[in-house]
Image (cartoon, rainbow, N blue to C red):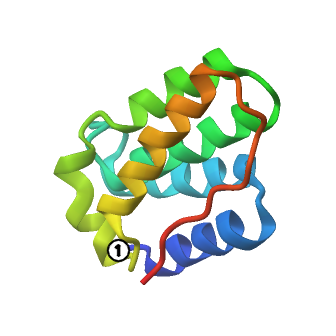
């Protein structure tokens, strides 16, 4: 997998620093480098949208968080193998996203969500 070091930086930023804006920046850089912005069917986009959704949730933007997390599920199954290559349990992560969307619909207060790393 290309950009393994950048993906590891993303995982560290997501899991430890909890800086979702920085996660966006890292993943956007990967996406631009790897796709030249020619497709949104890319693992970096799905992970980027999850980080942005959590950013919105933490800032109590429930509507924005729901919209972004729902978008994170677009093409998710098509990139799940690439998510797995990052040692992230893609099935469990997808379920976490679905559960988070349900929590957002009832305006549940923000709670930390972590990537399910193997």
Query: Residue 5: x and y, percent?
Result: 52, 81
Q: Secondary structure at mark 1?
A: loop
User: Which residue is pictured at 47% across the width and 58% down the height?
Assistant: 30
In the image, residue 99 sits, relative to residue 114, either above or below, namely: above
- Is 75 situated left or right of 54 in this image? left
Q: Which quarter of the picture shows residue 74?
A: top left
Q: Position of residue 63 (x, y in %)?
A: 63, 15
In the rendered image, the quadrant that contains the N terminus is bottom left
Mark 1 lies on residue: 2
* Image quadrant in which the C terminus is located: bottom left
Towards the viewer: 38 or 83: 83
Q: Is residue 9 visible?
A: yes
Please provide percent x and percent y for residue 36.
Answer: 35, 45
Name the residue: 35% across, 57% down. 34
Residue closer to the observer: 61 or 100 = 100
Residue 46 left/right relative to 102: left
Circle 1 packing at 10 Å, graded few (<14), some (14-19), many (20+), is few
Q: In the rendered image, which quarter is residue 79 located in?
A: bottom left
Q: Residue at x 24, y 39 (%)?
A: 75
For residue 1, say whether it is visible. Answer: no
Looking at the image, is 13 positioned above or below residue 20? below
**Where does residue 56 sit, x and y in percent of width and height?**
71, 31
């Amino acid at each position: 997998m290309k950009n393994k070091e950048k993906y590891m930086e993303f995982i560290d930023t997501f899991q430890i620093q909890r800086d979702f804006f920085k996660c966006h920046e890292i993943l956007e850089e990967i996406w631009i480098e790897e796709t030249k912005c020619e497709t949104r069917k890319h693992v970096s986009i799905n992970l980027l949208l999850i980080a942005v959704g959590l950013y919105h949730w933490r800032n109590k933007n429930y509507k924005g968080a729901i919209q972004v997390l729902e978008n994170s599920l677009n093409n998710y199954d098509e990139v799940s193998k690439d998510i797995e290559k990052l040692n992230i349990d893609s099935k469990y992560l997808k379920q976490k996203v679905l559960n988070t969307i349900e929590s957002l619909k009832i305006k549940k207060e923000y709670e930390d969500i972590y990537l399910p790393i193997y």
